[in-house]
Image: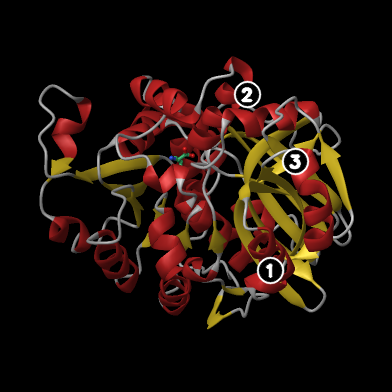
Amino acid sequence: MINVSILGYGTIGSGVFDILDKNSHIITKRNGEEIHVKSVLDLRDFKGDPVESVLVHDFSEIENDDEVQIVVETMGGLHPAYDFVKACLEKGKSVCTSNKALVAAFGPELLSIAEKKNCNFLFEASVGGGIPIIRPLKTSLAPDEILEISGILNGTTNYILTEMSEKGSDFETVLKDAQDKGYAEKDPSADIEGYDTCRKIAILTSLAYGRQVGFEDIYTEGITKITERDINYAKKLGAKIKIFGSGKKDGDRISAMVAPKLITQEHPLYSVDGVFNAILVKGNMAGDIMFYGQGAGKHATASAVVSDIMEASKHLGINIKTIWEPEKLGLVPFEESISKFFVRLSGTAQDNSAKAGKAFGSLTPVDAGYSDEFAFITEAMTEGTFRKAAEETGNVINKIRIDA
Ligand code: HSE
């Protein structure tokens, strides 16, 4: 029998508890050994809940329990999660976490402790909820050089953009509706400003290229500036607007970015709508591979955590090597990143077309029936060139990059 402790009985922690109970038969059969939840740490009491009999309030009871071989961290946040995880790894206990903030900030350090102590630090649930992506990157795609890893990594913003497109509502109305339905947090900034996607793509890019990609080094733009008009232009172009996290090879260098992008029907992620997530990986041998599923939610995310528990239980005393060096990967400077841009300028087409052509070069106008503005698509150019052209015209209302 394998003894597990869970730190934090919130949405994901209670989901893990639930799955280990409801699917115990199939889990034991596939795992070869029964997985038993010996203790659950939470500050709260849960009167009448099945967790009551194993609930503890003091972390040291878990840290010092030599029978506990695997610890699940589903507390969220950096502290005390980091301190608890580190203490468990130092004791040789494997840790499985869903905490992307923890993994993005401390991944290499915690992996290195796990390696020294012959245990494991696993984090399948930290990116893409129930979508298997971390383990496939480490194992199934191990023979490949990763040319690109990009995706729709945030359910809240994908839901908002989908609703704006389908219902024709503005950003604020849809956000309020999403909050009422529980799809967006009361404080939605981590999602709508792109910070959540940023941490997830920092983890994926670090794993794809084997070195630390600092989330603080990734250019991050959220969806708060997307308006009904942008959505209508997208429709006119047969396109959708999606917020992408992406990490890709650019010659000998790696570029990473989080930003809303226009994608057309030919794009593999075009039909990923609502709260769903999808990740596209381009391998130099395997080609394009797409991972699609629920990027959030109690049981979907908890299922990924349980898969890590099973992986850890099959590797007790054996470290599964994960290459994630602590030295930072130098990213292509933002100003040198290349994109095509969809641009809207205030004022009529007559006022703007010559001026826009002079500043941006060759362009293709887009008419969605708004006579008080001039919209167009540029050729591919660097962010630096785009910025200078935008400064020259001085009347950019909005711009959205195009993902080809
Ligand atoms: N707020 C996140 C999302 C939860 O909407 O995808 C999962 O990380």
Q: Secondary structure at mark 1?
A: helix
Give the residue pinned by disc 3: 375
Precedes in sequence: disc 1 or disc 2? 2
Point out which mark residue 388 bears: 1
The residue under label 2 is 165
User: Do the residues under discs 1 and 3 have CB atoms within 8 angstroms?
Assistant: no
Q: Amino acid at mark 1?
A: Lys
Position of 182 relative to 56 (above/below)? above
Q: Which amino acid lies under the numbered mark 2 shown in the image of this protein?
A: Ser
Mark 2 crowd level (few <14, some 14–19, many ≥20, 10 Å Cα): some
The residue lying toward the viewer, choosing from 396 and 54, is: 396
Between the residue at mark 1 and the residue at mark 3, the CA separation in whole angstroms equals 18 Å
Separation (CA) of disc 1 from disc 2:
31 Å
Residues 370 and 166: in front is 370
Q: Is residue 76 left or right of residue 243?
A: left
Local crowd size for mark 3, using a 10 Å CA cut-off: few (<14), some (14–19), many (≥20)? many
Left or right of residue 76, residue 59 in this image:
left
N-term mark: 3 or 2 = 2
Residue sitting at x 14%, y 61%: 60
Please state which amino acid type lies under the numbered disc 3. Ala
Q: The residue tagged with tag 2: helix, strand or loop?
A: helix
Task: Report if the CB atoms under discs 1 and 2 are less than 8 Å apart.
Answer: no
Say which label, 1 or 3, has the lower sequence index: 3
